[in-house]
Every structure is written in structure tokens, then in C-alpha cells.
Image (spheres, helix red, strand yellow):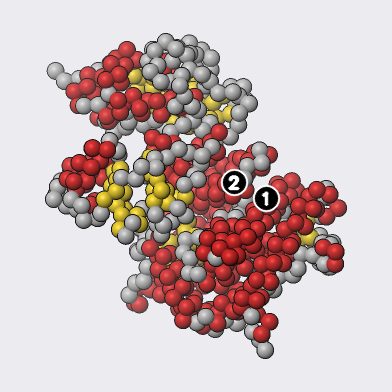
Amino acid sequence: MKNTISERVADFLKNFPPFNLLIKKELQSLSQEVVIVYQEKNSTIFNEDTTPHTIFYIVHKGAVALRKTTNNEIIDICDEGDIFGLRPLMANENYKLEAKAHEETILYGIPLDAFKPYAKKNEAVSTFLMESFASNTRNPYSKSHKGKLYGNETVDTINPEVKLLDLQPVKYSKKIISCSEDTPVKKVAQIMTKNRIGSILILKDDLPIGIVTDKDLRNKIITGKHPITSTASAIMSSPVITYPKNLTVTQAQMAMMKSSISHLCLTQDGTVNTKAVGILSKHDVMVSLGDNPAVLVKAIKRTTKYKQIKPIRKSIMHLLQGYLDENIPMGLISKIISELNDACIKQVITISLKKMKVPPPTEFAWMAIGSQGRGEQMLHTDQDNFLVFNDVPESDLPKVTKYFLKLAKHVTKGLHTIGYEYCPAEMMASNPKWCLSLQEWKNMISHWIINPGPDEILMSSIFFDYSISYGNRDLVNTLSDHIFDTTKKYPLFLLHLANGALQNPSPSGFFRSFLVEQDGQHKDFFDLKSRALMPLVDAARVLILSHSVKSISNTWERYEKLAEIEPNNSEIYLACSYATKALLKFRTKQGLLHHDSGRFIALDKLSKEEKIKLKRTFKTVKEIQELITVRYNVNNLLR
């Protein structure tokens, strides 16, 4: 007689690692030993520093919070398919965390004695458990683990004084195994098997165009979706998601979570336009992160209402303050905070789409612009965005536009709910001016470039710093290509854009004294944004546009790219990169200190050291403006 309960357990377990690595017979046998545990909300599963249970757990329904009782800080939230309580399997130690039901929960308890034999003989299972256990040890590859996975040796624990280990550089494989897009799938599998790798890079002209993983072989070949006679191009994931090689553990995990992938391609400059230097797998980054951005991303994805995201954004600000206190490099801080902000926006859009009665009538992209589009928005400011949707027949355009305007109003309302103020100038997708089809956007951009008056240059300076928050990236690439192509046809536009980049007032006067506001609400305050940051931002925009560089909107990354393109000017460009980060860090600290945007600075509140650091950036601002003036002959522009 069949045991229907154990069959249901097996049907559930087979969908989640490491149980999906077991053969059917093993899984059915193990499922008969599984204990079903019901936990009421807030009930304790195990306490910190208590004797380990004889089982570890996988969440069937509900959620479990893991926390440190010393400060009542939640380390992680485990939901459906997540395993926890692995310590008794890995080492004879008491639990290091408390586990409580975050909501009404059903758990499957996996007996240690029943599970150990499968883990010992299955290397893939063993590896996965090591990675998962790293969520508590923070050091899964230490010597103390080697050969002692199921032994009686205790595992070294991390010094509690060591902080922010999630910011350490991630280790990746520099051995690139690749093939061409015409390589038969059978040959691809043979190469992967021979080299004992889980992915292979697909190259064309020595540049990455795709990647094939074990998952692709399972889902696309073994299922019969594609014949074994197919070539790599038929089953590869393309385009490749690329990042620069100096990724941290946190960035790597967030990148994988963001795109729901298990492998990243690392290239020389982080784009598909340069050669690959390494491959990063999920295995490479599965280390403990504790209270970190990855936990916040997971919490964001669990929300179902706008208001649930707002307290998470407060946690992001706490994280930001912690990074600043630890003096973490600003470039790294901005990447992490920007990813978290993007996760919030993406979830707001996801929730908004559920409010619509029908799905979108065509593909669209939600775009962040301004400081958020540049990945430089650290503090809570107003929202700046636009929406572009795929071209549709002219007869359908009013109806489709109406749909996306309604969606945009939901989204902007949601963003307001979580802490983004409405843009005073209504530079938002809920404004019909900024919710357009691809062709309508092309027409508008062409008008700005062909007729570069003051208003058109102002619009270009705002809308040409963009990044996608949600939707179809092809729309964004098409828009970028249109900007580059039109600019090449009308080079006079760059001269006007350069002139616009010189309109911000100077940061200093005689003897490098601070030039402050002469009247208005901020009289006698120094405008850090207009006088110091924006001249650097505007100069980077026109210079990078002149080289038609796509997919880099961040100001200091633009300067770093410019240093590569123009090595004779690398010194000034790298100085601009440093100055931008220093100024943004200063503004962020001031904003957190005074609970505002950090834009206007009371000079009498600054220390002598702070004033000196600010003034050091002024020389760089002056030099880049002089370069712009000479290169584009701006002084003769209007003569």
C-alpha cells in the first residue's frame, strides 16, 4: 500500500536543493523518515546556544526568522524550500541563532541519521550543504572544514568584532572554458563534462555572446524542447549578464538574485564589449552574509503591499550609515544602495501590475533618470522616471497609452508611499509627457538633438542619465542607439550640451574661498550639488556621449572609462572620478546628519579638515570645465 503522505513529501522535496540531487529511489526512502512539524506564529523552533536537534529543517509553508538574541536582530528569513538548522549535521555545536516561526508555518524535519548516508556518497549534496552552512559560519572554505564535514571536530567561528565581511572581493575562476555558437550541443556537454564545469561561455570574435549551463541542458535538451543535434546558439542564455572582475561577495549575490541566475561572466570593463576574464558561479559566492543587503532584497521580494516596503527602506538607510561609519569606498556603497533602491522600485512595479485588471498590452520599460539613473541617489529624494513601451499600430496607441498612464499612476503613488516624494517638476511617468511609445520617444529625442535650445539641452541633461528599473532592456538599447546615431548626425548638439555643462556657478572665489548663496531660503549656505557635483556630472555626460559609450551612466565610472579611452587625459579623468565619489560621500554624510538631502551646507558647522577636503575637489572641477571649454570651443559657440 502506498504511503500518500511520504509521496507528497517527496513531490515537494524534489523541487529544492539538495534533495533534487538525489535519485528517485533515495528520495522516496528518505521521505518516509521525514517528520512534519507545525509551528504557530512567533513560536520557537530552537533557541540560541541550545543542544542541537536530531533533525534539520526545510520550510514547506510559511516563514522562519533566524535571529541573534543578543540584539534581537533578524539575520535571515527562510521561506518555502529554504533549509536551516544545519549545525548538528556539520559540527557538534550548539545552535548559534534562534529560529522562530515568522508566520504560521509547516516544516519538514529531516532526520540526520537518515540523511547522512546520502550526503556522504553524493559530492553535489555535500557541496550544497557546505554552502548553506556558510550562512552561519561565514567561512565555508576554511581549513577547519576540510575533511571534517561530518566529523566530530568543531568549526572555528568568526571573531565577532570583524564586520562587513560581505564586502570582501569574491573569488572566481579565471579558467575560461568556451566554444562558438555553432558548436553542437553534444560537444558542449562533452566539453563541460571533461572539464568538470557547470557552465561554458559562448564567444564570437573573442567576446561573450551567451552562456550554457547545466540547467540549460536539463531544461532545453533533456526535456526534448530542442533536439540533441541543436547548436549552442539554440539553448544558450543571451545576452550574457556581465560584471567587472572586482565584484564583492554582496554584489555577486545581489546580481544573481536580481537576475535569477547562477553564473556571472566577468569581463575587463564589466560589459559585453570586452573580453571575459573569469566565470563566477553561485558556488563561489555562497558564504555567510549575516545582516546584509541580500537579506534586505529577500525581504523586499516578500512584500505584497507598498507600505510594507517603507520600513525596509529605513533599514537601507541604517545600512548606508553603517557603511559610511566603516569608511567603505563610496563606489561600492553606491552600487549596493542603488541595487537595493532598484529592488524597491521593481517590487512597487510588480505590486502595481497586480492592481491592473489585465496584463500589459505590449512590452515596456520603467526608467529611472537623474541621480537615480546614474546610481548616485543615496538619500531619500524625489522621484524622477519615465516609461517607454513598444510601438503599436496607430489605431491602438490611445488605448495602450491610457493603460500605461494608469499603471504609471499606481507606480508613482506606490513610490510616494515608500518614501519618494513626487517630483515638483512632474518629471514622472504618470505625466503624459513622459509616458510614450518607443517611436514617440525617438521623435522627442531627435527634436532635442536637432534643435538644441536651452530647454532642449535641459531636457537632455535630465533624460540622458537613465537606467532601467523594470521591463524590456531591448527598448533601452534601441533608445541608446538612437541617441548615439542622431548625435553623430548633428554634432553641433554636443557643443550646446558642453555649453550647458558650464552653466553651473563656480564653487570658489578669491583665495579659493567658498562661494555661498547670496539670497533666498539658503542664504549663506554652500550649494554642494550645483557648485561642485553637477559640473562634474555634466562634463562626464557630454564626454561619454561623444564616444558613444553605452550602458555606463554612473559619473565616476564614466570618468574611469574616459581614462581608458583617452589615456593622455587619464590623470584629470581619474581625479574627477575621485572627486565625484568624495563629494557624494560628503553630501550623503551631511544629509544623514541633518536629515535632509545634504545639498546645502552650513559652512560654520564644518571642521577645518572637512573644509580642506572640500576645497581639494574645487581644483578638479575647474580643470574639467577648462577641458570642456577648450575641446568644444565653447567661448566661440554663440559668437
| Vertical relation: 159 (above or below) 206 | above
Query: Tag 2's secondary structure?
Result: helix
Residue 447, percent across and down? 50, 81
| Vertical relation: 83 (above or below) 529 | above
Which numbered circle lies on residue 333? Answer: 2
Which numbered circle lies on residue 585? Answer: 1
Quarter holding the C terminus? bottom right
| Vertical relation: 629 (above or below) 147 | below
**Horizontal side of residue 135 vs 56, given as left or right:** right
The answer to which quarter of the image holds residue 597 is: bottom right
The answer to which quarter of the image holds residue 383 is: bottom right
CA neighbours of label 2 inside 10 A, class few (<14), some (14 to 19), many (20+): many
Residue nearer the viewer, 11 or 292: 292
**Horizontal side of residue 86 vs 69, given as left or right:** left
| Vertical relation: 392 (above or below) 230 | below
Residue 572, percent across and down? 64, 62
Query: Tag 1's secondary structure?
Result: helix
Of mark 1 and mark 2, the one earlier in the sequence is: 2
Quarter holding the N terminus? top left
Q: Are marks 1 and 2 in contact (CB under 8 Å)?
A: yes
The residue that appears at 64% across and 80% down in the rendered structure is: 633
Which numbered circle lies on residue 486? Answer: none
The residue that appears at 74% across and 46% down in the rendered structure is: 593
Residue 159, percent across and down? 59, 23
The residue that appears at 20% across and 52% down in the rendered structure is: 183
Residue 207, percent across and down? 35, 57
Direction bottom: furthest residue: 639
Direction front: furthest residue: 568
Q: Amino acid at mark 1?
A: Lys
Residue nearer the viewer, 331 or 316: 331
